[in-house]
Structures are given as C-alpha cells and as structure tokens.
Amino acid sequence: MRKMGLERAVDLGEYIIKTGATVRAAAKVFHISKSTVHKDISERLKKIDPILYRKVKAVMDTNRAERHIRGGDATRQKYLIRKSLKNKLPE
C-alpha cells in the first residue's frame, strides 16, 4: 500500500469525525470517489488505526441511519422552491 493512501485514510477519518461529514461530502472535499472513501475507511483505516476506525464508523452509522430524513427534506425543499417560483410568474 502506498504511503499516500495510508495518510489519506487517516486524514479522511479525522475529517469525518471533526465535521460529521457524509461519505459524499468527504469525497467532494478530498476530490476522490465515494468508493475510495469507503475503501479507505473500511479497509485501510481499520488496519492502520482501529480506534479511529471505530469513531469514524459510529459517525458513518449515524449518517446512514439519518439519510432517509435528509433525502425527504431535500425533496420537500425542491417542491417548495418550485411552488414559490410558479406563484411568482406573471400570467
């Protein structure tokens, strides 16, 4: 395993714990794919730093449990915005 991957795994773990970021958010910040975030956390970090891994896993489990709520809120906001724009259009 390259040194860069090991460092990135630790940096990702610390970032997720510090910010409570989702996998998508962390991937966007580090300019990597969601798959890479999962691999770094679930495989590399687990071997490198098991204590940090457990902390990150707790944050990721919380995010996973709340994702249906976030999705519903996003959809609700989408339709509220559409409705308000429709009401502002002149007829």
Image (spheres, helix red, strand yellow):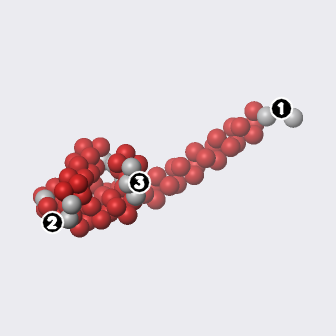
In the image, what residue occupies the spot 21% across and 60% down? 2
Q: x, y (%) of residue 79?
A: 64, 47
- Quadrant for residue 1, please give it: bottom left
- Quadrant for residue 87, please give it: top right
> In which quadrant of the rendered image does the C terminus lie?
top right
Q: Amino acid at mark 1?
A: Pro
> Which numbered circle lies on residue 18?
none
Instruction: Mark 3: give few (<14), some (14-19) or many (20+) Cα within 10 Å.
Output: few
How far, Cα to Cα, is label 2 from label 3?
A: 23 Å
Q: Identify the residue under disc 1.
A: 90
Of circles 2 and 3, the one toward us is 2
Q: Is residue 56 visible?
A: no
Q: x, y (%) of residue 74?
A: 53, 49
Towards the viewer: 16 or 29: 29
Of circles 1 and 2, the one toward us is 2
Instruction: Mark 1: give few (<14), some (14-19) or many (20+) Cα within 10 Å.
Output: few
Mark 1 / mark 2, whichever is N-terminal: 2
Q: x, y (%) of residue 16?
A: 28, 49
Mark 2 / mark 3, whichever is N-terminal: 3
- Residue 5 is left or right of residue 75, and the answer is left
Provide the secondary structure element on which disc 2 rests: helix
- Residue farthest along the front direction in this orientation: 2
How far, Cα to Cα, is label 1 from label 3?
A: 39 Å
Q: Amino acid at mark 2?
A: Lys
Q: Identify the residue under disc 2.
A: 47
Q: Amino acid at mark 3?
A: Arg
- Residue 87 is left or right of residue 74, and the answer is right
> Which numbered circle lies on residue 24?
3
How far, Cα to Cα, is label 1 from label 2?
A: 61 Å
Q: x, y (%) of residue 83?
A: 70, 42
In the image, what residue occupies the spot 19% across and 56% down? 3
